[in-house]
Amino acid sequence: MENSAPEKQSVRVTILSRPYTLLAAGDPREVEEVAASVNDLMLSIAAKAPNADTTSIAVLACLHLADKLRTLERDLSLLKERVDRKSEEFAGMLEQLMISAGEP
């Protein structure tokens, strides 16, 4: 039986001057880019709160990312509602056109 799961590979990243080795199933560059983004965010937080410890910085970064995710999920939900409404409008218009075209 073949294993359909993609093979994971080790990716080394550095966040707040600490090295981490992660296992990634996808493109290692994507993992590196995400880690760089997290590192930048945490460095930004550390610069604004120089007395904060690593755990506090990590918690603040998580809260920031959770808030960003929540906003994106809300935006996506609104977009899906708009698409659904437009699809219904277009379906109604198409139905009217088909009715009109069927009349002599």
Image (tube, rainbow, N blue to C red):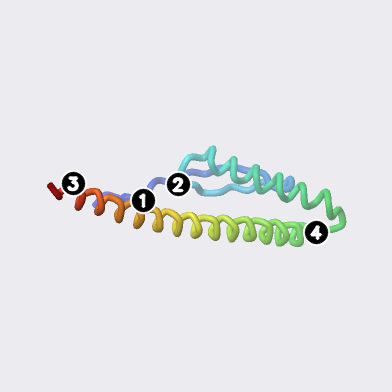
Q: Earlier in the sequence, mark 3 or mark 1?
A: 1
Q: Nearer the viewer, mark 2 or mark 3?
A: 3
Disc 3, disc 1: CB below 8 Å?
Answer: no
Disc 4: CA contacts within 10 A as few (<14), some (14-19) or many (>=20)? few
Q: Residue at x 59, y 40 (%)?
A: 33
Gap in Å between the C-alphas at discs 2 and 3?
53 Å
Q: Give SS at disc 3.
A: helix
Q: Give SS at disc 2.
A: loop
Say what amino acid the circle numbered 4 marks.
Asp
In the rendered image, residue 57, in percent from the top left (x then y), is placed at: 75, 57
Q: Nearer the viewer, mark 3 or mark 1?
A: 3
What residue is disc 2 on?
25
Gap in Å between the C-alphas at discs 3 and 1?
52 Å
Q: Residue at x 24, y 48 (%)?
A: 97
Q: Earlier in the sequence, mark 2 or mark 3?
A: 2
Between 50 and 71, which is closer to the camera in this rendering?
71
What residue is disc 4 on?
53
Q: Earlier in the sequence, mark 3 or mark 4?
A: 4
Disc 1: CA contacts within 10 A as few (<14), some (14-19) or many (>=20)? few
Q: Earlier in the sequence, mark 2 or mark 4?
A: 2
Q: Quadrant of residue 74?
A: bottom right
Gap in Å between the C-alphas at discs 3 and 4?
71 Å
What residue is disc 1 on?
5
Disc 1, disc 2: CB below 8 Å?
Answer: yes
Q: Earlier in the sequence, mark 4 or mark 1?
A: 1
